[in-house]
Amino acid sequence: MTASVTTPVYRALFCDLRTDRLLDVLPLTETKFDDYIGKPGSLTANVPLPEGALAARARAALQPGRTAVWLERDGDIWWGGILWTCTPVSDEQGRLMVQFQAGTFDSYLDHRILAHDLTGTGMDQFDIARSLINHAQEQPGGDIGISPGHDRSGVVRDFSYAYSALARIRELLDKLGQLSDGFEWRIHCYRDAEGRRVKRLQLGHPQIRTGHADIVLDHPGQILTYSLPTDSTVQANVWVARGETANTDQSQESQPLTVSEESAEDLENGWPRLEITSDHGGVTDEATLRSLARAELARQGRPEVIPELTVLLDGRITPALLGARVRLRIHDLWHHEGLDTQYRIVGMAVTPPQRTKAETAVLYLEGV
């Protein structure tokens, strides 16, 4: 496919976080943004302030912790999040600008804790995740318009979350998803058929998957640069997980609940014993702790390979494709026989076109 010669138009919308009421549209420079499955993404940019009227508008619109930022590319929503920091900067010539940083909407859940205990039995794990989101948004001032959706995973769990643990909502969601046979989640931002800006809780069991056909990426070709690190420092065939003490007898010494899971097959097939430990505050149930250990062991059972590609954007790749499969084909001196492997997109960092620089994206991949 031939890349379009038309330069895409980026536009930043600044809105009230709770109502999504448009506050202003301001020019940006030095813009960079990213989004991921499994962790918050970020946006950094500058707002140049060549005259007083624009400075006054920026002061009114850029309110950290209260302003939502939507980034459009040719009218499509490519990123959405919350303004967290705002820094006016003046250089030696007296030129003024505002540097700001925003985090994807899921970063809001790092700033929220339970208002009271939450318990339930026999609930689909997606419903548990939605109940946490709904709980956060039911509190006074807590509704930022996240749409929870209606999907099911088919995995049923019991749950008990104590207010006294002061756990953050994001922490609870992450731990729930990390259980054996768990799920992935993110806040997907887009514009619906009526033109409204949407923040939707996207859930995937066991993973978030998007698209049906593989996106083929070639080097030499659309891939400008690549990196294929293989890291065994995070590999394990024995996982020891430690929770909280379950002992309620004050007269006896308390020891934290500890469980161990191992891959007998790896050890029998000649791998050396490789052990990793993890701590899980608030977990007092052995079955839950073993589930967490088994899930970690499954994820870290082999050397970690996280390919990183820099590609020219040609219309096929957008942030909506997080979770999509790519077919990576490389032929060079290292891969002299040719590499042809499938991966899944789990992260994307975009640099819009600037001056003489083309629009590029760094793709972060994992094996499928």
Image: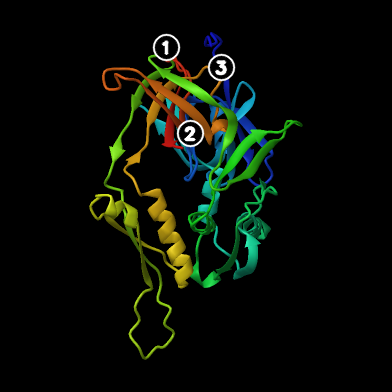
Q: Which residue is mark 1?
A: 356
- Whole-angstrom CA distance, mark 1 to mark 2, is 28 Å
Task: Indicate which label's residue lies in the foreground, 1 or 2.
Answer: 2
Q: Amino acid at mark 1?
A: Thr
In this view, the residue in front, 307 or 267, is 267
Q: Residue sitting at 42 percent across and 18 percent down?
A: 218
Q: Which residue is mark 2?
A: 345
**Drawn side of residue 50 relative to residue 293, left or right:** right
Q: Where does the image place residue 182, in percent across and percent down from the top left?
A: 53, 54
Element at badge 2? strand
Q: Residue sitting at 34 percent across and 78 percent down?
A: 255
Q: Which residue is mark 3?
A: 8
Q: Is residue 316 visible?
A: yes
**Drawn side of residue 122 relative to residue 313, left or right:** right
Dot 3 or dot 2, earlier in sequence: 3
60, above or below 275, in the image = above
Alpha-carbon neighbours of circle 1 within 10 Å: few (<14), some, or many (≥20)? few
360, above or below 252, in the image = above
Element at badge 3? loop
- Whole-angstrom CA distance, mark 1 to mark 3, is 14 Å
Image quadrant where residue 315 sits: top right
Element at badge 1? loop
Q: Which color scheme does this rendered protein use?
A: rainbow
